[in-house]
Image (spheres, helix red, strand yellow):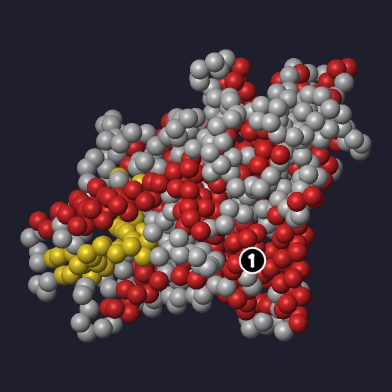
């Protein structure tokens, strides 16, 4: 038997064939006569510290060798049911695509360094003439991700195997094209970074071709590691991931899906094929062209791109999106012929999409710069001044735990917050506009530990991305890299007036409000008169009888200072942190994996543009430049 020289390619968030520089290099090298490897073993490991793997136990009565994958403070599952479903679909799609190219995908569970060490040991002890030539993987940002890279490198070196860490090329601007060499040189303000890489339309590199073929997998494959068993179907994979989550649900009294009138805004399947189809659909329908005008929507599928879940897992890349936008703008793809804007260059919508992709880049670079501070309560700013409320902490009474429970279940009594929290729990998605308001409500109106919100989003969001999620929770909590810090406060009542004026979104997800017509009562059901509550089916509901916070803002008029914490319902923590009046800006950070716009707020006008203003100005300049060429 001919000796097998094996290259192990360890995948994490690079689940695609096209625009994957690692796989393309493998293909090119395999065509050379003196190639250093004859076989390739693509490998995906469910990381036990981030994803609960006890559902893979061959004997359901046995115990997992790993602690449960729960968050630090709230003890939530770190990867909830919506994301594990999308992840399972994405991994299986990758497996099928690899098989079409003549390869396959080995799936394991555990800690990456241990899995690699076990595979190398089995190859070393194999009776067949087989050796491992190298272990390759793509770098990621994050404390755990860097630990994984060190552990894999250590395992490879232990067995005398070459290790290579590849650049992560799923982002908009290639690391090799950044205008600085050291992470510490990244500007603390996004605008400064954006200006250093403009014009955005010219910034990304070209995509890498899909490899037409790949070397075969080695034979035999090393045995599975006990006590785990890996299913051989996508449905089986999903079932194993779901099992522990169903056995221990995240909420004891979860919200129910409304009986009618609403659907998920994220009805998409994981995997490269679904992601690329979505990009084509957005361009062909004109949604990309209209994006700047629709981005703050709350209901439906096409007000925003919904590409974030695919981007987070590397099923598609930012430069693939950019490449298709170029073909549309330059009139090079006939499938878009007849679509508004086709062949007319960059427009405000496509410029805004590029702006959002750059914001994702920036959040990732902030993680690189600040490292572990991404997860610290004091944040990037190292702000230790505020006494955050945390259930179970010293001096924290039972009311704090009750407050958190109602926040998670969507029964706060502030309808925008409740609608968003219920939508998130039931579908794994909620709009970026809603995410900003939820974060501001928890951190600034309730004064709760913002990390609980970040942990809950990590559990619930389909499109969770470590840098975007944690960086933007910091941003809105006032401890991140927002120039306005704690002064930025969202008034969820005013936000309803601006973005849900008829209460359609609130009534869609908070079904008990559907008998109401007055926006003031829809947004703040505690304002329904006691005489009418019984007739409307609202009597006795805690959202009506006992809201967590009465944010006094009069719909159609000016609010009054009082329980809202300021004229526009400002922060309840303003005095504690020495902050000013509650701001009324329409912005905040971006969440999960998608950018948003920090609108030009009252207090911000003296300082210049907020992110929405910055984006508007940048998009206008980009379009003007394109038209002048």
| Quadrant location, the C terminus | bottom right
| Residue under the point 22% across and 78% down | 35
Which image quarter: residue 252? top right
Residue 386 lies, in percent from the top left, at 60, 29
Q: Which residue is denoted by mark 1 in the rendering? A: 195
Whether residue 115 is situated above or below residue 16 in the rendered picture: above
Q: Label 1 neighbourhood size at 10 Å, few (<14), some (14-19), many (20+)?
A: few
Residue 236 lies, in percent from the top left, at 38, 48
Q: Residue furthest right?
A: 557
Which image quarter: residue 397? top right
Which image quarter: residue 283? bottom right
| Residue under the point 75% across and 51% down | 607
In the image, is 275 to the left or to the right of 54?
right
Residue 462 visible to the viewer: no
Residue 27 visible to the viewer: yes
In the image, is 489 to the left or to the right of 307?
right
Whether residue 579 is situated above or below residue 364 in the rendered picture: above
| Residue under the point 63% across and 33% down | 443
In the image, is 341 to the left or to the right of 113?
right
Residue 296 lies, in percent from the top left, at 74, 52
Q: Nearer the viewer, residue 506 or 194?
A: 194
Q: Which of 265 and 537 is in front in this view?
A: 265
């Amino acid at each position: 038997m001919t000796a097998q020289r094996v290259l192990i390619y360890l995948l994490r968030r690079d689940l695609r064939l096209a625009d994957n520089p690692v796989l393309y290099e493998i293909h090119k090298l395999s065509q050379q006569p003196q190639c250093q490897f004859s076989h390739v073993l693509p490998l995906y490991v469910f990381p036990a510290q981030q994803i609960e793997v006890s559902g893979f136990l061959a004997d359901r009565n046995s115990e997992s060798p790993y602690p449960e994958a729960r968050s630090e403070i709230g003890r939530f599952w770190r990867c909830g049911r919506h994301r594990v479903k999308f992840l399972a679909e994405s991994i299986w799609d990758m497996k099928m695509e690899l098989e079409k190219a003549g390869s396959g995908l080995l799936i394991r569970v555990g800690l990456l360094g241990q899995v690699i060490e076990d595979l190398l040991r089995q190859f070393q002890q194999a009776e067949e003439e087989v050796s491992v030539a190298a272990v390759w993987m793509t770098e990621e940002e994050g404390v755990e991700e860097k630990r994984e890279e060190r552990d894999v490198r250590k395992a490879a070196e232990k067995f005398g195997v070459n290790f290579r860490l590849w650049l992560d090329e799923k982002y908009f601007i290639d690391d090799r094209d950044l205008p600085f060499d050291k992470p510490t040189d990244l500007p603390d303000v996004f605008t400064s970074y954006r200006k250093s890489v403009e014009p955005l339309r010219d910034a990304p590199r070209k995509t890498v071709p899909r490899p037409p073929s790949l070397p075969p997998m080695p034979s035999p494959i090393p045995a599975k590691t006990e006590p785990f068993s890996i299913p051989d179907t996508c449905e089986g994979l999903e079932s194993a991931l779901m099992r522990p989550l169903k056995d221990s649900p995240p909420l004891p009294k979860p919200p129910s899906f409304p009986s009618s009138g609403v659907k998920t805004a994220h009805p998409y399947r994981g995997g490269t094929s679904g992601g690329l189809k979505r990009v084509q659909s957005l361009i062909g329908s004109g949604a990309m062209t209209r994006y700047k005008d629709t981005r703050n929507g709350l209901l439906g599928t096409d007000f925003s791109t919904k590409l974030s879940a695919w981007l987070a897992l590397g099923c598609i890349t930012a430069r693939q999106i950019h490449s298709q936008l170029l073909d549309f703008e330059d009139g090079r793809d006939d499938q878009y012929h007849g679509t508004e804007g086709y062949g007319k260059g960059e427009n405000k919508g496509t410029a805004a999409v590029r702006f959002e992709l750059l914001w994702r880049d920036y959040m990732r670079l902030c993680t690189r710069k600040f490292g572990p501070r991404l997860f610290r309560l004091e944040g990037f700013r190292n702000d230790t001044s505020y006494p955050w409320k945390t259930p179970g902490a010293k001096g924290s009474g039972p009311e704090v735990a009750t407050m958190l429970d109602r926040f998670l279940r969507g029964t706060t009594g502030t309808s925008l917050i409740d609608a968003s929290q219920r939508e998130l729990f039931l579908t794994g998605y909620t709009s970026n506009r809603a995410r900003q308001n939820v974060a501001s409500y928890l951190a600034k109106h309730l004064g709760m530990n913002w990390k609980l919100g970040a942990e809950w989003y990590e559990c619930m969001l389909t499109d969770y991305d470590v840098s975007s999620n944690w960086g933007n929770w910091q941003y809105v909590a006032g401890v991140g890299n927002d120039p306005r810090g704690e002064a930025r406060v969202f008034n969820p009542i005013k936000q309803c007036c601006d973005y849900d004026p008829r209460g359609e979104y609130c009534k869609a997800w908070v079904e008990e409000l559907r008998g109401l017509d007055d926006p003031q009562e829809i947004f703040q059901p505690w304002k329904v008169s006691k005489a009418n509550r019984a007739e409307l089916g609202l009597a006795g509901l805690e959202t009506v009888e006992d809201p967590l916070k009465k944010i006094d803002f009069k719909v159609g008029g000016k609010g009054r200072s009082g329980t809202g914490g300021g004229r526009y319902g400002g922060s309840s923590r303003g005095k504690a942190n020495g902050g000013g009046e509650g701001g009324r800006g329409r912005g905040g950070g971006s969440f999960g994996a998608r950018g948003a716009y920090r609108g030009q707020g009252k207090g911000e006008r003296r300082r210049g543009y907020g992110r929405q203003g910055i984006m508007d100005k940048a998009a206008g300049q980009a379009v003007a430049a394109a038209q002048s060429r």
